[in-house]
Structures are given as structure tokens and as C-alpha cells.
Image (spheres, grey):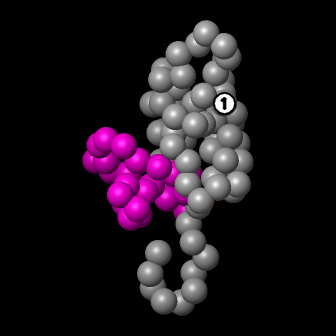
Amino acid sequence: MVTSIDIRSEILRQTGERVSVAPRDVAQVLTRDGEDWRKLLPKIRAEAISLHGENQLVFIRKKKIVSPEGLKGVYRLGRPAADDGSGQP
């Protein structure tokens, strides 16, 4: 059984290695052979929203940072950019 801690750790690991990741990428790593990775997507989204609330993660849609509230469709996850003082994400 995949725990919230497993999901959170995998999200942070993958977003630390790449510019952005699809929730599918996280789910596929966490599922065993024969398991349906799609069943993990709601839990991954919930953990991603939690990490977003802690300013550790951003949601990306069409190459722009967006709010996860009301977000529908395809999105990616990434780490927030370091604040360079420009006020831009």
C-alpha cells in the first residue's frame, strides 16, 4: 500500500531532478506490476496541493504557473523558482 509519505517523497524527488513532471510519472513509479497507476492520481493531486500550500510545489498548465483550485485537465508539477526579486514566477 502506498502511503502519503511515499507519494510526497516521490513528488519531491522527481521535481528535484527535472524541470517538471506529470502526475502520471509519479504514479507509475509507485505502483507495482499489474496495478493500475491511475488509481493513485487523486492521492497524488491531494499531496501536491498540500505541498503547494507549503510553497514547495507549483502546478503548471500550458507552461504557466496556475492555482490548483478548480484546475481541470492536464497539468504538471514543478518546484517554485528561486525569488530573483523581479516579482515574476
**Which residue sits at x=56%, y=66%?**
80
Q: Which residue is mark 1?
A: 29
Residue 64 screen position, x and y as percent: 38, 64
**Which residue sits at x=55%, y=54%?**
20
The disc labelled 1 sits on which kind of residue?
Val
**Residue 12 versus residue 24 in the image, above or below:** below
**Which sits in the foreground, 39 or 61?**
61
Among the 4 quarters of the image, the one containing residue 9: top right
**Residue 77 versus residue 8 in the image, above or below:** below
Residue 34 screen position, x and y as percent: 61, 9
**Which residue sits at x=67%, y=17%?**
32
Q: Residue furthest bottom?
A: 85
In reply to whether residue 54 is colored magenta, the answer given is: yes
Do we see residue 59 in this rendering? yes
**Which residue sits at x=48%, y=21%?**
39
| Span colored in magenta | 50-78
**Residue 81 versus residue 44 in the image, above or below:** below
**Which sits in the foreground, 39 or 49?**
39
**Residue 32 versus residue 85 in the image, above or below:** above
Residue 43 screen position, x and y as percent: 51, 31
Do we see residue 3 in this rendering? no
Label 1, secondary structure: give it. helix
Among the 4 quarters of the image, the one containing residue 1: top right
Label tally: 1
Left or right of residue 53: residue 4:
right
In reply to whether residue 76 is colored magenta, the answer given is: yes
